Each structure stands twice: as structure tokens, then as C-alpha cells.
Image (cartoon, rainbow, N blue to C red):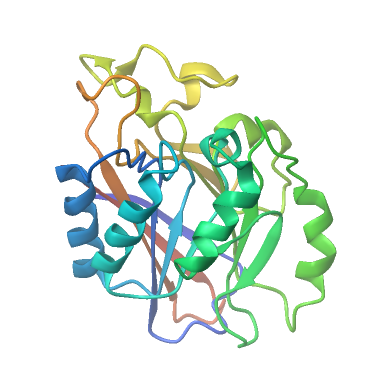
Amino acid sequence: MIRLEALFPSGRGISGQCRIVFMSDLHIGTSLRPAHRQAASLVRAAQPRLVILGGDLVNGESGWPLFREWLSQLDLSPVICVPGNWEYKSRGGLRRAAEHLAAAGVRLLRNAVLRLSEEKGTAVVVGIDDPRRGKPDPDRLLPEIRCLRGAPGAVIAACHNPDIIPRTPPWVDLLLCGHTHGGQICLPGRRAILTSSRVGRRYAYGLHSLGPGRYVYVTSGVGVTYLPVRINCPAEIVVLDLAAAGDRAQRLVVRMSEVQW
């Protein structure tokens, strides 16, 4: 199901199609749940160039070996991750989580920039620290983006928690978030009861406009926490396809689809 088709100023640097998968909130505990295995299967089928994980990967130290097992099922690289609040509050904090991620071959993107290729005009991915327990500082990344060879066609930012929305700089075209689980337990019509977010139920789930040509997408995530159930709120991964529009304006097309189960 197509959720978004956005046109950004430049499509230079995108040849063919660049596919990205975003997913969040695995919350791997003492075992891999069917939702984890389904997510891995869907990622393999999507064959993305890049996977972005939105944080809250495990529920404790015992989850890291299972995370590496799950990661091996993706059968691809690279994979990057932004920190979630669980990475901070687990034993050893973010330092220990970063060690586990590095050992698994996952790059932690914390207030940092990743360019999808070295070609002029291509999109960049910005990883923003968790606003609840970390120190998000997206503004300091703009000089780094400006130093890239040629202006990027689009800036895609990932941050675990939608609480970052009021602090999102205007140069971010698409913000990807998790944390809310979409409510996890919802009333009919996907009406979230709780979101554990300061921005409340307005940004509990889905695609929202932040202004002309700017969007935020909050995913319902893959895993569950505290209560091992989902009601009226399916798990999902999010697939983004970036492609040059092919017209004289050299626009970049971003098509977003959600894959739920």
C-alpha cells in the first residue's frame, strides 16, 4: 500500500532505484518471536540497499545473542541503528549496547550523517540521539551536510522517539520514528490508548505532514513490551524507494509502503 510519494528538489546521484527498510522496537527478550522471524523474511524479500533500525532492539543483556541470530537471518548489509531508550537503560548503558552493535557489524548512527553514495546530489541519512535519555543535537549536523560534495537530494532523519518532532530542523525532509508501538493495544479504528510520548496520540502512528514537502512517519514497530500482545495494531516494516523522477527538474521521488502482518 503506497503511503507517500514525495518529490524533492534533486534526483541527481540516484541511478535506478535505492531501497531502504526502516523498522523499530524489536524488543528481543529470551526468545525470537514469530514477528521477529517474519520481519527478517520480509526484509530478505525486499532486498534493500540499507536497513535502518530505530532502536529498542533488546529487553536486556540476554537478548543480544538472539539479536545477532536475528540479524544473520537478514542476509544483507549494511545495517545502521539509532539509539533508543532501552539501549540507554539496559545494563552497561549505551556504551555496552554500542559494543554489542559493533560486534554484530551494525553501525550506531548517533548525531551523525551517512551518505548513501559518493555521487553528487544523493540522499543522506541522519541519525539523531534518543530525546528521552540521550542528547539529540541535529543542528550541529547541518555544517557536515553542507560540506558534502553537492547538495543532497533529500535528507532522511531517523530518531527513536517522536518527541523529537518539535526540535526537527526544517532541512529534514522525512523523519522516521518508532517508540510508540503505534499504541500496541488500540481501540477499534487504530486509536492508541497509550504512546509513552510527550507528543501524545497525535503522532502515535503513521504518516504526518510537518509542513510543505516535509513529513514524519511513526512506525508501529515489530516487537512488544510489558504486555506480549498487539490489539488493533499490526507489526510492520517500512519500505522506502528512492528514485530519480527523470524529468528536467531532476526531482527525487520517495515512495513509502508499509508491510504489516
- Quadrant position of the C terminus in the picture: top left
- The residue at the point 67 percent across, 34 percent down is 131
**Residue 157 visible in this rendered orientation of the protein:** no
Position of 255 compared to 33: left or right?
right
Nearer to us in this view, 124 or 120: 124
- The residue at the point 49 percent across, 67 percent down is 103
The percent coordinates of residue 77 (x first, y second) are: 40, 75
Position of 227 compared to 15: left or right?
left
Q: In which quarter of the image is residue 193?
A: top left
The percent coordinates of residue 47 (x first, y second) are: 27, 73
**Residue 90 visible in this rendered orientation of the protein:** yes
- The residue at the point 67 percent across, 65 percent down is 113
Q: How many marks?
A: 0
The percent coordinates of residue 232 (x first, y second) are: 20, 22
Position of 20 compared to 257: left or right?
right
The percent coordinates of residue 245 (x first, y second) are: 44, 75
Q: Quadrant of residue 120?
A: bottom right
Nearer to us in this view, 8 or 88: 88
Q: In which quarter of the image is residue 126?
A: bottom right
Position of 257 compared to 163: left or right?
left
Nearer to us in this view, 56 or 200: 56
Nearer to us in this view, 6 or 63: 63
- The residue at the point 61 percent across, 29 percent down is 163
